Amino acid sequence: MASTSSGTQRPPSPSPLRGAAFAREIFTGAFAGDFGVWVRSAGDAFRYRRALGAEGVRLLFNINAEFAAPLAPRPLAEVARSVLFSSSPDALCVSGPITGQPVDASGLADVVAAVRDSGVPVLVNTGFRAELAADLLRHADGAIVGSSLKVDGVTWNPVDLRRVKELMERVAQASG
């Protein structure tokens, strides 16, 4: 949560004034990790989105936090079903332990199986790279890609067009 000048807490802004189509964040759950303790409520995010007049901004729910662990651990497939029921996400995102680290393919498969008939897409949130594309896309509907497309695979480096082309070739092959 971000603090306002009055000291009240508010969820991260979906930035509708900049034309955002979606916001990707931990919108629900309680976690502890490198950034301290996070307690998120999807209701807060929905109310804030409405207050901004940004109801058209889609919310992509990270269901497991990078750099943190849940305070009340449950199997990830159970978390996915719970978030689906309680929070009406536009998509579910499954993460590895930190930025750039891949998701566990079997855990991803469990999440996809748990929400299969919902119509809600499941996205790989971290660690999606060329050599893993075919395996992960057997389960997921898509991916958020960042670090693997950077020079030397380093988050802070510029985009490496060679890496982009290689990834897109692998995605095309996997999509058949």
Image (cartoon, rainbow, N blue to C red):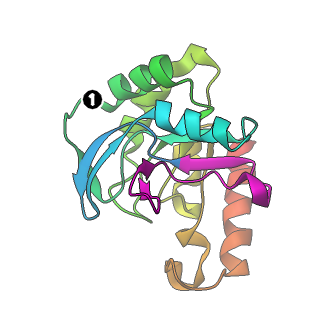
Q: Which residues are magenta?
A: 1-24
Classed neighbour count for the residue bearing mark 1: other residues with Cα under 10 Å, few (<14), some (14–19), many (≥20): few
Observer-nearest of 94 and 86:
86
Please count the marks in the image.
1
Regarding residue 92, the answer to whether it shows in the image is: no
Residue 17 counted in the magenta span? yes
Q: Position of residue 63 (x, y in %)?
A: 42, 39
Observer-nearest of 64 and 162:
64
Q: What residue sits 58% from the left and 14% below the top?
A: 117
**Mark 1, residue position:** 75
Residue 115 counted in the magenta span? no
Q: Position of residue 134 (x, y in %)?
A: 58, 48
Kindly indicate the quadrant of the structure image that contains residue 52: top right
Observer-nearest of 170 and 59:
59
Of the 4 image quadrants, the one containing the C terminus is top right
Observer-nearest of 140 and 122:
122
Q: Secondary structure at mark 1?
A: loop
Q: On screen, 115 above or below 125?
A: above
Q: What residue sits 44% from the left and 26% below the top?
A: 83
Q: Position of residue 142 (x, y in %)?
A: 64, 44
Kindly indicate the quadrant of the structure image that contains residue 137: top right
In the image, is 65 to the left or to the right of 130? left
Regarding residue 24, the answer to whether it shows in the image is: yes
Q: What is the residue that sits farthest to the right in this orientation?
A: 19
